[in-house]
Image (cartoon, grey):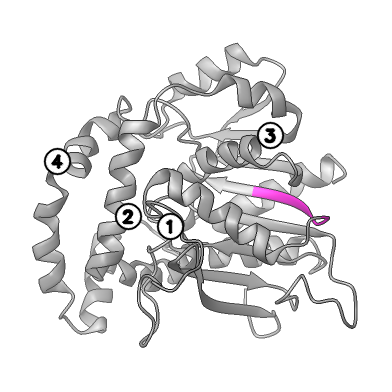
Amino acid sequence: MSEDHIAMHEEFIYCGGAATEVLKYGPWINLKKTSGESPPKLLFFIIPGNPGIVGYYRTFMESLYRGFNEKYPVWAISHAGHCSPPKGMDMTNDTEIDPIEDIFGINGQIEHKLCFLKKNVPVDTKLILIGHSIGCYIILEMMERAIDLKILQSILLFPTIERMAQSPQGKIMTPLLCNLRYVVYMPLYLLSFLPESVQASLIKFVLRGIKSVDEFSVTASLNLFRVDCAANAMYMGGQEMMQVLERDNTIIQKNLSKIIFYYGANDNWCPVQYYEDIKKDFPEGNIWLCQRGIRHAFVLDSSREMATMIIDWLKNKQT
């Protein structure tokens, strides 16, 4: 799909003291603007997985925006410090009046999203939250911490909300993320000096096994050649392994009618056993297991398909 006639705005801001990239589909750049035409009262707000690079979600966002006839803004926010800011902009802002403590950690990232909504979204705006992977854990925590948010629906895609270190992928990644991540920094530092075209070729080589790689995935992945972006992502990942332990059934029970869970059938971060366990605990919940073979990192090749499913779910619920 062409973006020629789609209003898309990209910006870097400081939020909570850290550089943050925000993508906005739709002509509504400032929802708190009071003059002129009233802004929409519904916002789709996407919280990414890790690495939290919003560029991965561009096709997904555009598909959602088109799917609802361009009536509602679709915004996505990066995780703090995961996207390479433009020249002249530092990764952190030391002059921030009220910086978030440990903003690159998992708790800081949760507060980072709440800070953004407080500063940029009117209190009466209704929200449809869409989380991917660790973004699902962040959304559940947001629902608990900010009960004043007008959340109509939370859609949790491939949710890493429990036992991350015990998952098949977690068992592999925990030693690296918690103890050995510094070993990765030097190779990344050397790779950062390569021309961008060579970096892009390396990314394409790594993704060569995927038949139809989304073109934006290659561009987004270039952020990982910047050492501080990769370091922030790995630091957050290490905290995920240590802190995302037991599923918070209390939060889920309180908000069950507002949540849709979508699990992968071949997902090494949240295996089918996790789906079966939560389905048993909440048999009345909207909890689904993928029948389409979509990978955990759906943004690499299945963004449009995932967006189409979400559009169908929400239209059926008459949202």
Residue at image mark 1: 52
Tag on residue 97?
Answer: none
Which span is picked out in magenta? 124-129
Per the model, the C-alpha gap separating discs 1 and 3 is 22 Å
Q: Could you say where residue 187 lies in the image, as x and y percent from the top left? A: 10, 64
Disc 1 residue type? Gly
Q: Amino acid at mark 3?
A: Ile
In this view, the residue farthest toward the top is 280
Q: How far apart are the two marked residues, 3 and 2, measured between alpha carbons?
A: 27 Å
Separation (CA) of disc 2 from disc 4 = 14 Å
Instruction: Check residue 128 for magenta coloring.
Output: yes
The numbered mark, 1 or 2, whose residue comes first in the sequence reads 1
Residue drawn at the location 44% of the way across and 71% of the way down: 215
Given residues 206 and 226, the one toward you in this image is 226
Between disc 1 and disc 4, whose residue precedes?
1
Q: CA distance from mark 3 to mark 4?
A: 35 Å
Residue 114: where, in percent of width, then height?
60, 52
Looking at the image, is 188 positioned above or below residue 5?
above
